[in-house]
Image: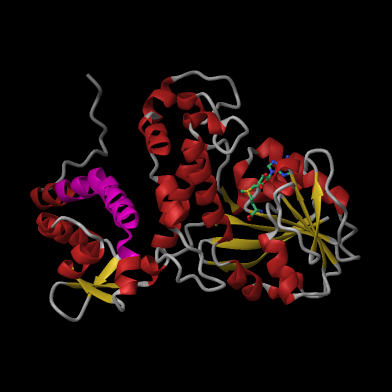
């Protein structure tokens, strides 16, 4: 029998009862995720928006063409979603309104800056991703070769966001890519405006892994003087929209990166392990001039930090778990970023600004 640690404290009665309530909450939080997914699939946020911003249960049942018998069940779903801060109660008893979170789930209401997040909810709660999370304990017990495949790859036999991912179903592949795009493109305009000091005065910029050029086009819109190049894999560049605002280059960042005064890595490094991050940053260093000539790498990523308000930190840590379950990547704390920068031969860095759960980092040769 294991020896009882001298520091183990037997909880008092009141603590035990609180602990039971906390255990219920933590064991059942998945039901909040599923209720959110259900609300998105039923298009409840869009229905409330179309009904003028407030709706009763009866309004929702009518608007969504649900059987009348489901009205009381819908009431219970909405009660959980209000309690979880996803909707708010309206002024009239039994009515519901949108808040900024549910506004992100309204179809067709997106302004330039409003990233429609339906597919983030659907993707992160998809069966393949949830099954990977359910396999976590089995994955921990396996002595896998290093670097280990993610639980997703170990369970499904193919990595996520890979050429072979469509073997899990074309619909899944399309949906999960929409989920990634929703995550990556969220609040792009705000990002550029909030951090215009990063781009001010730049003559040229390479957006490394810039996808279809959404970020590069947003930069050029605010800073038309910057010569912007987007590097991505040939299969992505082939589908990029034709426009004169940015130049597209098909290639592999592990081979070389088109030279520019600055290289942007937005939400790229969190997908790769430390060794690959060092390789990518070494290629970036080869692509930029000296610090005196304005050379820098601009990184937009999470910097894990206890110093943030608890909800922001919790969001960061959950996002790290999402990466751990589904990819070989991770979120990093400032000291972990520093280690990678130094290994890649950079001399200094600065966290220029934090917006939301992410930070803007400048790294200097
Ligand atoms: C997370 S996504 C897009 C991130 C993008 N910077 C954004 O914020 O929207 C990662 C991108 O990296 C690209 N990519 C992956 N491996 C690459 C490589 N070896 N060379 C160039 N691009 C690559 C993918 O095709 C994909 O478009």
Q: Exactly how many numbered labels are in the figure?
A: 0
**Res 343 seen here:** no
* Residue 195 rendering spot, x and y as whole percentages: 66, 72
Inspect this view and state whether residue 311 appears.
yes
Whole-percent x and y of residue 268? 65, 49
Residue 172 vs residue 280, the one in the foreground: 172
What residue is drawn where x is 51% and y is 23%?
Answer: 157
Question: Is residue 21 part of the magenta span, yes or no?
Answer: yes
Drawn side of residue 205 relative to residue 107, left or right: right
Q: Please state, as top left, top right, bottom left or bottom right, where the N terminus lies in the image.
A: top left
Closer to us: 232 or 190: 232
Residue found 76% across the figure and 39% down from its top: 279
| Dominant secondary structure of the residues highlighted in magenta in the image | helix
Q: Residue at x 66, y 61 (%)?
A: 214
Q: Nearer the viewer, residue 13 or 289?
A: 289
Looking at the image, which is closer to me, 277 or 268? Answer: 268
Q: Is 65 rendered above or below residue 130?
A: below
Residue 10, x across and y down, in percent: 16, 41
Q: Quadrant of residue 106?
A: bottom left
Asked if residue 334 lies left or right of residue 322, the reply is right
Single out the residue that lies furthest toward the bottom. 91
User: On the rendered structure, is 356 left or right of 27?
Assistant: right
The percent coordinates of residue 63 (x first, y second) are 25, 66
Q: Which residues are magenta?
A: 20-45
Q: Is residue 250 above or below residue 327?
A: below
Please indicate whether residue 117 sits to the left or right of residue 149 in the image: left
């Amino acid at each position: 029998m294991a020896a009882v640690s001298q520091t183990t404290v037997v909880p008092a009665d009141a603590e035990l009862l609180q602990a039971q309530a906390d255990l219920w909450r933590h064991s059942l939080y998945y039901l909040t995720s599923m209720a959110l997914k259900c609300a998105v699939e039923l298009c409840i946020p869009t229905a409330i928006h179309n009904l003028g911003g407030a709706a009763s249960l009866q309004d929702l049942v009518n608007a969504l063409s649900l059987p009348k018998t489901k009205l009381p069940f819908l009431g219970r779903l909405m009660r959980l979603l209000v309690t979880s801060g996803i909707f708010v109660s309206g002024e009239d008893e039994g009515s519901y309104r949108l808040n900024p979170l549910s506004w992100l789930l309204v179809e067709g209401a997106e302004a330039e800056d409003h990233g429609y997040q339906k597919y983030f909810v659907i993707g992160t709660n998809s069966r393949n991703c949830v099954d990977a999370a359910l396999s976590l304990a089995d994955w921990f017990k396996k002595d896998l070769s290093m670097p280990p495949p993610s639980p997703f790859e170990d369970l499904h036999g193919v990595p996520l966001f890979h050429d072979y991912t469509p073997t899990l179903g074309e619909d899944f592949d399309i949906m999960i890519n929409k989920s990634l795009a929703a995550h990556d493109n969220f609040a792009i305009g705000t990002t550029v405006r909030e951090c215009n000091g990063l781009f001010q005065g730049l003559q040229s910029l390479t957006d490394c892994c810039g996808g279809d050029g959404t970020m590069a086009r947003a930069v050029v819109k605010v800073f038309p003087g910057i010569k912007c190049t987007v590097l991505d894999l040939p299969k992505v560049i082939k589908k990029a929209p034709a426009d004169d605002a940015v130049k597209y280059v098909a290639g592999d960042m592990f081979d070389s990166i088109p030279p520019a005064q600055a290289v942007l890595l937005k939400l790229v490094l969190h997908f790769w392990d430390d060794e690959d991050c060092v390789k990518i940053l070494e290629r970036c260093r080869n692509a930029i001039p000296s610090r005196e000539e304005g050379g820098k790498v601009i990184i937009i990523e999470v910097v894990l930090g206890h110093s943030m308000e608890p909800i922001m930190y919790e969001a960061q840590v959950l996002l790290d778990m999402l990466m751990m379950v589904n990819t070989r990547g991770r979120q990093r704390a400032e000291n972990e970023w520093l280690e990678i920068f130094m290994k890649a031969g950079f001399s200094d860095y600065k966290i220029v600004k934090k917006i939301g759960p992410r930070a803007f980092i400048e790294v200097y040769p």
